[in-house]
Image: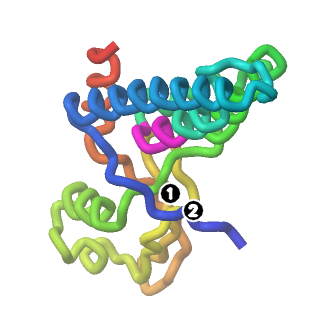
Amino acid sequence: EVQVLKEGRRVPSGRVDRALGFASLGFGLALGTVAEAASRVLSPSKESSSLVLNDVNSDRLASTLCRMRGAALKLGQMLSIQDETLLPPALAKALQQVRKGADAMPISQLQQQLQSQYNDGDNWKESRGFVSFEDRPFAAASIGQVHRAKIETSGEVKDVVVKVQYPGVADSIESDLRNL
């Protein structure tokens, strides 16, 4: 049986939202670095790996890239295919998490996106012949997520998959590039 993804946070698509996402990542990484330094002062026997690339910061990096999606996630995924022996273990761990894919859109945002794309409001399922549509995706990537569904055509019910693009993907990619 194929596993479904847990619901994630809303996809940030505007330039300001994405800039704030990256700013909070930077602030969080700085805070994590200070916490790691303080921990080492209080417990000198701790290993002497990088202050910045610690386990907490690697989890924070992976979580942010998976939440931001778009170009940020794609960049992380491209970096993740590099030879892991060349990377610090904490960074390799973060990139391995990123390679697994993005967070799923919240169901409310998914419904808004489908209503918008199909231009049918709340009636999009019936007007498009959907017999069923699973709100929870079974896969998610940098620009969209994939759902199982059933449609009826010519009196026959067929299993299909529907890829739903995250809202504002083109804008978010452009925002990421401008924010660089």
User: Is 175 placed above or below 165 here?
Assistant: above
User: Is 41 placed above or below 61 here?
Assistant: above
How many marks the image carries: the answer is 2
Residue drawn 58% across the image and 45% down it:
101
Visible residue check, residue 169: yes
Residue drawn 33% across the image and 23% down it:
176
| Front in this rendered view, residue 173 or 155 | 173
Residue at disc 1, secondary structure: strand
* Residue type marked 1: Val
Disc 2 and disc 1 in contact, CB within 8 angstroms:
yes
Please provide percent x and percent y for residue 65: 48, 35
* Residue type marked 2: Phe
Residue drawn 71% across the image and 35% down it:
93
Please provide percent x and percent y for residue 59: 59, 39
Asked whether 61 falls inside the magenta stretch, the response is: no
Q: Earlier in the sequence, mark 2 or mark 1?
A: 2
The quadrant of the picture occupied by the C terminus is: top left
Residue at disc 2, secondary structure: loop
Q: Give the range drawn in magenta.
A: 63-69
Left or right of 104 in this view: 13: left
Please provide percent x and percent y for residue 81: 71, 25
Visible residue check, residue 77: no
Find disc 1 in the rendering and name its residue. Answer: 146
Find disc 2 in the rendering and name its residue. Answer: 138
